[in-house]
Every structure is written in C-alpha cells, then in structure tokens.
C-alpha cells in the first residue's frame, strides 16, 4: 500500500541501517540531522496539547553513548533556536568521554548554553517542561544497570510536563524504564513499540529510508530538511530499501502519504454523482446523535451526495439541522428503532448509493437487528458495519465487500465469526487494519489519541469510511486505511488546537479539511 512502511524487529532494523549507510559516517550524520529536525518539529507540535511554551522553557536531555543521544542533543539545539531563552540541562549516564563520534559531534551543537548536571538529580531544576530520552537505542539489551535504573526512576518521578523518548523508551519493559508520553520512532518503527506500555503515544518520523530520493541530484542528506534523500549522500540513488537484505514482515505503519490521492484537483467535468454517495442507515429515538454525526462526517469528508435512512420521527429536526443530506424516514418500532417494514425503502435507495454505512445508533432491538441483517444480505454495494450492527449474523450476511469497525469489546463479540475477506478496523490506542482470514499484512495507525476517547468518535469514523469506500469501492482496504489516518490526523489537530479535555467530539469535523491539506502539501 502506498504510504505504508514495514515495522521491523530491532535486529532487522540494525541490519537494514547497516546496509543502508554502509558504515559511512557522512551519511549517518546527515540522517542524524534529519532525525533531529523531525524530532524537534514533532515535539513542538505535541507540546501544543498541553499549552504554549513558557518564556524560558527548561529541557532535560538524557544522553547515552550513541545516535539516540546525538538525535536528542541536536533536537535540543533546534528548539533553542526557536526559544532563545530555553535552558538545557544534560545528563551523561556514562560520562561525556563515552560518547561515540557522532554523538560527540552533536554535543558541539549545544556548547555554550547546555549545562551538564548530575545523574543523582541534586542540581536539577525543580521542574522541566520537556525531557528528551536518548540513553539507549534499539541495540539495548536488558537488564538495566543499577545506576541507569536509578536515573530513569528519578526522571520518572520528577515533575516534567512532556516526556519524549527517541526511537524507543530506554529500558523498554523494565520496571524502571523511561515512561514516555510520546515515543518518536526515527526512520524505522520497531516491533517493541506495538506492545510497550512505557512508549506512551507513538509518532513515526519518516526520514525517507523506504522511499526513493526526489531526484537524481544526490546532494547531501538534509539540505532541504525533508530527509527523503537519506540514501543519496554518496551518489547512490537506488530505491531506498532495495536489496538491503531485510524481508518485510506482517506489520506495517501507515503514514500521511496514504492520503496523497485525495490532495489533487477534482475533475472539472465531474459532478456530485462522481464523488461518492454513501447511504447511512442509522439511529433510533434512543440514540439519534449517532446517525447525525455519521451523516455529518460523510458530508464533511467529500461525498457528492449522502442519503441518511433514519427513524421517520427524527427527519424534521435533522433536515433542518443538515439540509445538505437526503433524509429518508423509515418506519419505527414502538420503542423507536428501525422497523423491518422499512426494508423496501432501503432497497430502493440502493439504486442511487455507492456504499452503505450500517449501525451507528441502531440499538439492539431484535426487529431492528433483523432489518440490519437483511440490508447486509441484500446490499449490492460495499458496507461499513459499525456499532450495534456488529453482530455475527449481520457481519456474515451477503456477499458484498465490507469494512467492520469494532472497538475491543465489539471485536471479542465477533472475532469467531469474521467472514473471510472482510476488512477489520480494530479501534484502540493503536488502531490496526487487517483483512480477516487472509493471514496478510496488518497496518497500524499511530495517529489520534485520548481526545478520541469520547462518545461519537466511532460514528464519525464510520461516516468518513463510508464516503471513502463509496469513492473507491473496489479497494476497501485502502479506503479503511485512508479513513483511519485522516480520522487520527484530524484528532491530533483538535487536541493541539483545543487541548484534550474541554472539547466536543463534533469539533473534530472542523479539523478534517486542514488536516487533509497539511497531510498532502
């Protein structure tokens, strides 16, 4: 899939980088510079979730012997350029003389303003705004030595607003491992990140290791700040990753690049019928908001037309609120769910639609679930099956392609009944996408965060997925990947603009457009 890169074990990453750089320190230094730029940029963005930088930020940098420590030092120097009053305290757990050549070279970038401090914390500031953990890289082998364990335990207990690990949190899963708020995977995402509680939230920093240089002009890595030419510093312009002796495994990380096809101009000869028409079958008197949010999301994400089939009693208020949608009122059960007698109306709506979103806010009345099973069985279009419609008898009905969107509890309900070929979006802190029964690749999204831990975020994802599925009905896996990445990027923007606490999930809708424009520029 375009825009997805392999996640490697630590051993595989070591072999890959050895083949990629060939021991050439010029190339390694350029890659370190690119990593530092990406680290500084992303730390600055993620800090926005907790507020603005103070006038005189204090940063604690933990520097080991190798490249992670060099990345951290160079990133601190870049942050200092942006905040001239920034104070940098540096801990060298193994002493300055232990630094390897490139880390020692990076130390010169902070000379004149960085203050070496003791590992025992006696001369630390009372609190720090940021801590950059660069003690160990992916070559770390447990256990932690007692001095380093004591240092990391001390850091974990110290007042620090944002804790950032470079590549991997030092100590990995040891009791005293560095407890990161964010881990920034530099160049290659490593498999421990998929299960490490100490990693916090994960950001993948694409340094271009898996993409070709932008041109045949193989200038020094990092000249334009993109990092995309990391294989080209010595004039070797082959596709990065070709013939490097590492076979990609099952796990892949999704990047913003999956959204690239959504960034171009639309065909000037096209009209509303060419931009996707999802049919949203959703809602009940008990859960009316879910249908409204799914419909709003489908509209906001670029659909040419959206038909929303909802309980007929909801149509007047919904049509007044969202006149852009085609509101189709369906008969209701006495308790306010969708009645089976409305099936003929849904079947008639199939003629105009290109995908079906089934489930948000339906409730679990037996008659309503029977209607959902009939819709799934009869649909000629690919389906997004969400929320209460995630029942074994519904997800297995019919032959149309389908995308299932369960969170953890819903997944346990349907895991044994997944139909082969269904695309499954397993929602969680690390959302994963895979094709059921295929034994194929698993795509992981590191976008989004706790701001999505609100009722309604799944309804928004369902509507977004429905639009993208209507636009690319032949490739539900790609539609699902794009939806998850876009959903997460908009959530990241929302958290940075408003913080993670005092927000409404519908404010996410306003972030869809700027998130896409940033991703594809």
Image (tube, rainbow, N blue to C red):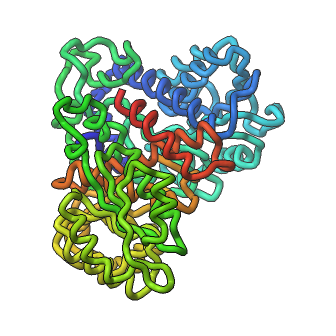
The quarter of the image holding the C terminus is top left
Q: Nearer the viewer, residue 321 or 494?
A: 321
Residue 98 % position (x, y) = 57, 29
Residue 25 % position (x, y) = 37, 20
Q: Residue at x 69, y 35 (%)?
A: 51
Image position of 49 with respect to 289: above or below: above
Q: How many marks?
A: 0
Whether residue 180 appears in this view of the structure is yes
Q: Residue at x 35, y 62 (%)?
A: 280
Whether residue 408 appears in this view of the structure is no
Q: Residue at x 49, y 79 (%)?
A: 336
Residue 89 % position (x, y) = 71, 27
Q: Nearer the viewer, residue 338 or 300?
A: 338
Q: Image quarter for residue 383?
A: bottom left
Left/right of residue 322 with respect to residue 350 in the rendered view: right
Left/right of residue 415 with respect to residue 276 in the rendered view: right
Q: Residue at x 22, y 71 (%)?
A: 347
Image position of 290 with respect to 244: above or below: below
Left/right of residue 423 with respect to residue 197 in the rendered view: left
Left/right of residue 454 with respect to residue 519 in the rendered view: right
Q: Nearer the viewer, residue 507 or 450?
A: 507
Q: Nearer the viewer, residue 391 or 471?
A: 471
Residue 474 % position (x, y) = 16, 54
Image position of 224 with respect to 393: above or below: above
């Amino acid at each position: 899939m375009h825009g997805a890169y392999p996640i490697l074990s630590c051993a595989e990453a070591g072999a890959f980088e050895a083949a990629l750089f060939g021991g050439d320190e010029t190339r390694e230094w350029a890659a370190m510079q690119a990593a530092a730029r990406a680290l500084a940029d992303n730390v600055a963005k993620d800090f926005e979730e907790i507020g603005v930088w103070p006038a005189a930020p204090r940063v604690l940098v933990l520097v080991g012997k190798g490249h992670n420590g060099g990345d951290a030092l160079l990133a601190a120097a870049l942050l200092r350029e942006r905040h001239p009053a920034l104070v940098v305290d540096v801990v060298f757990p193994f002493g300055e003389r232990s630094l390897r050549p490139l880390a020692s070279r990076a130390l010169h970038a902070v000379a004149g303003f960085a203050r070496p401090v003791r590992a025992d914390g006696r001369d630390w500031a009372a609190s720090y705004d940021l801590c950059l953990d660069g003690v160990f890289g992916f070559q770390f082998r447990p256990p932690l030595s007692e001095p380093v364990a004591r240092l990391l335990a001390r850091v974990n207990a110290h007042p620090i607003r944002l804790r950032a690990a470079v590549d991997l949190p030092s100590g990995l899963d040891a009791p005293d491992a560095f407890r990161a708020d964010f881990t920034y995977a530099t160049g290659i995402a490593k498999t421990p990140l998929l299960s490490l509680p100490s990693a916090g939230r994960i950001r993948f920093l694409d340094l271009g290791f898996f993409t070709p240089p932008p041109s045949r002009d193989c200038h020094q890595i990092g000249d334009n700040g993109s990092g995309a030419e990391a294989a080209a510093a010595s004039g070797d312009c082959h596709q990065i990753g070709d013939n490097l002796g590492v076979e990609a495994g099952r796990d892949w990380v999704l990047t913003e690049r999956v959204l690239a096809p959504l960034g171009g101009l639309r065909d000037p000869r096209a009209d509303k019928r060419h931009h996707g028409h999802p049919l949203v079958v959703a809602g009940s008197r008990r859960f009316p908001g879910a249908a409204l949010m799914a419909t709003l999301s489908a509209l906001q994400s670029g659909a040419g037309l959206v038909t929303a089939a909802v309980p007929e009693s909801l149509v007047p208020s919904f049509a007044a609120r969202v006149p852009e949608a085609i509101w189709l009122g369906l008969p209701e059960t006495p308790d306010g769910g969708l009645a089976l007698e409305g099936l003929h109306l849904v079947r008639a709506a199939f003629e105009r639609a290109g995908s079906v979103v089934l489930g948000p806010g339906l409730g679990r009345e037996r008659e309503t679930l029977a209607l959902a099973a009939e819709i799934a069985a009869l649909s000629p279009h690919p389906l997004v099956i969400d929320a209460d419609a995630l029942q074994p008898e519904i997800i297995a009905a019919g032959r149309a392609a389908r995308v299932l969107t369960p969170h953890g509890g819903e997944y346990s309900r349907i895991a044994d009944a997944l139909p082969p070929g269904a695309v499954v979006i397993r929602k969680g802190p690390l959302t994963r996408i895979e094709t059921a029964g295929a034994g194929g690749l698993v795509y992981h999204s590191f976008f989004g965060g706790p701001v999505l831990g609100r009722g309604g975020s799944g309804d928004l994802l369902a509507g977004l997925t429905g639009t993208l599925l209507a636009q690319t009905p032949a490739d539900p896996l790609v539609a699902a990947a794009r939806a998850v990445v876009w959903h997460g990027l908009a959530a990241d923007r929302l958290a940075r603009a408003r913080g993670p606490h005092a927000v409404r999930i519908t404010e996410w809708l306003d972030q869809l457009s700027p998130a896409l424009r940033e991703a594809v520029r």
